[in-house]
Image (cartoon, helix red, strand yellow):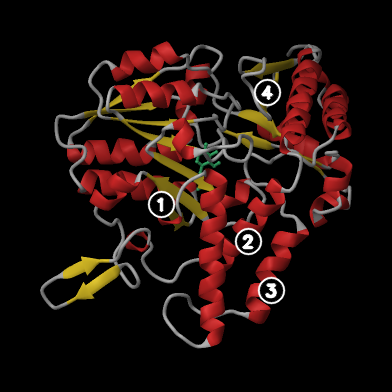
């Protein structure tokens, strides 16, 4: 039986009970098994990978490649389609640069992103479109931050060649109809880049069932270490694309005149990789696979509902997003009359961690007519008590800022 209380014991920062940690969309806490796997790597088999044939180096290589296999199985793909990156940001930059450099998008072409994107799935496309004279179309959200399939297909039918979109928005936690979007795009031979940074930690993502051409995510948002992420792609396209970075390990033969490149996935992994990151991420995936996942998801959804309902009952709190089950684990809100930074600072004084600001999603916040918000984001180790402590603290904020109630 899934029990958040048992889960909490596995997380050194959580089990102290000192902090209500509600900033999981920024990064999750790490279970001891992940921390230990990193220590074990450095204590017992630290060596560079794919370069040497002494036993220490062979062990490091073996574990690094085993980590790739674990992640490939998790996503339901073959290992050579898993490219390790520093995170979702680097994965998206990698695929975007390679697509432009490889001529898959050319001057005069059109591509699209949505207004709900994190900057890391917006700015790379925007900047490269400007440089290569490609037109960037925008798929708009509803006033609540959701994007129905019809809004996607409308833009698809404007002749775009590529669509980059998030499966779950980081500012509002809205889950987009990503299965239908990828299906509609494939029917129209439009390439899809799915930003899974928020989706992968909360949904069982099987890349080929979804039918996206590329998926990017970060390890640190799914209990893994920082500095490791994944780009998973369609093999036939990856084989065609030129590398984004050049250097060691990604080559086949180098002469003064020419270089030929390594096979997949190494063609896209220039330089010494983050070996301990890959090993730690594989451990995190193993951890996630060993818990009763469906119950864990139900638990997070029920906490989201509790939080949404509780916030809705506080008259001086304004909530953003649809407020129904399209919203997963993330709730953005403001206390009327207060700057979100002041609210977050006050909550910190009550030992509650939430994020405040624009959440690296300025176009989405501007679309909502706000500059910033507070964002509470939940994960599997959060409890009803965490949610209630946040709600209680917000109700009591009027004792510190009495003008909130007077609506000044
Ligand atoms: C939806 C989304 N995409 C991309 C990113 C970028 O992830 P990272 O900073 O780990 O590269 C984030 C991070 O918050 C995100 O929420």
Q: CA distance from mark 2 to mark 3?
A: 10 Å
Q: Residue at x 52, y 12 (%)?
A: 143
First of labels 2, 3 by sequence position:
3
Q: CA distance from mark 3 to mark 1?
A: 27 Å
Q: Which mark is residue 280?
A: 2
Residue that sits furthest to the left in the current view: 257
Q: CA distance from mark 3 to mark 4?
A: 42 Å
| Above or below: residue 407 compared with residue 112 | above
Q: Nearer the viewer, mark 3 or mark 4?
A: 3
Position of 37 compared to 382: left or right? Answer: left
Q: Position of residue 70 (x, y in %)?
A: 57, 55
Q: Position of residue 94 (x, y in %)?
A: 35, 50
Q: Which residue is denoted by mark 3 in the rendering?
A: 40
Q: Is residue 87 visible?
A: yes
Q: Residue at x 79, y 36 (%)?
A: 347
| Residue contact between numbered discs 1 and 2, judged by CB atoms under 8 Å | no
Q: Dividing the picture into quarters, in which one does residue 99 lie? A: top left
């Amino acid at each position: 039986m899934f029990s958040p209380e048992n889960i909490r014991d596995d997380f050194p920062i959580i089990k102290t009970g000192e902090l209500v940690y509600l900033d999981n969309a920024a990064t999750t806490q790490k279970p001891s098994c992940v921390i230990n796997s990193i220590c074990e790597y450095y204590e017992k088999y630290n060596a560079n990978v794919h370069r040497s044939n002494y036993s220490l180096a062979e062990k490091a290589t073996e574990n690094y490649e085993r980590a790739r296999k674990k992640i490939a199985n998790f996503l339901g793909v073959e290992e050579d389609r898993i490219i390790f990156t520093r995170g979702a940001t680097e994965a998206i930059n990698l695929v975007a640069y390679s697509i432009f450099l490889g001529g898959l998008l050319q001057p005069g072409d059109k591509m699209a992103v949505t207004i709900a994107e994190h900057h890391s799935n917006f700015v790379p496309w925007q900047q490269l479109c400007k440089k290569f004279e490609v037109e960037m179309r925008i798929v708009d959200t509803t006033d609540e931050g959701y994007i129905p399939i019809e809004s996607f297909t409308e833009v698809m039918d404007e002749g775009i060649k590529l669509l980059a979109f998030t499966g779950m928005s980081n500012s509002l936690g809205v889950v987009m109809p990503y299965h239908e979007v990828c299906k509609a795009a494939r029917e129209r031979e439009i390439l899809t880049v799915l930003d899974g940074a928020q989706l992968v930690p909360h949904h069982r993502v099987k890349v080929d069932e979804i039918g996206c051409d590329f998926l990017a995510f970060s390890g640190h948002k799914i209990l893994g270490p920082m500095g490791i992420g994944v780009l998973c792609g369609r093999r036939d396209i990856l084989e065609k694309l030129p590398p984004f970075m050049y250097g060691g390990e990604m080559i086949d033969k180098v002469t003064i005149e020419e270089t030929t490149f390594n096979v997949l996935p190494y063609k896209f992994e220039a330089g010494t990789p983050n070996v301990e990151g890959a090993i730690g991420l594989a451990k995190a995936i193993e951890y996630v696979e060993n818990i009763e996942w469906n119950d864990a998801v139900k638990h997070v959804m029920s906490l989201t509902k509790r939080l949404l309902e509780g916030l809705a009952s506080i008259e001086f709190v304004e909530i953003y997003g649809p407020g129904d089950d399209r919203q997963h684990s993330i709730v953005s809100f403001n206390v009327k009359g207060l700057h979100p930074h002041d609210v977050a600072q006050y909550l910190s004084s009550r030992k509650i961690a939430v994020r405040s600001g624009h959440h690296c999603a300025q176009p989405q916040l501007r679309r909502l007519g706000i500059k910033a918000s507070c964002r509470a984001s939940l994960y599997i180790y959060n409890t009803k008590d965490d949610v209630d402590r946040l709600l209680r603290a917000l109700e009591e904020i009027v004792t510190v800022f009495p003008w909130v109630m007077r609506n000044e």
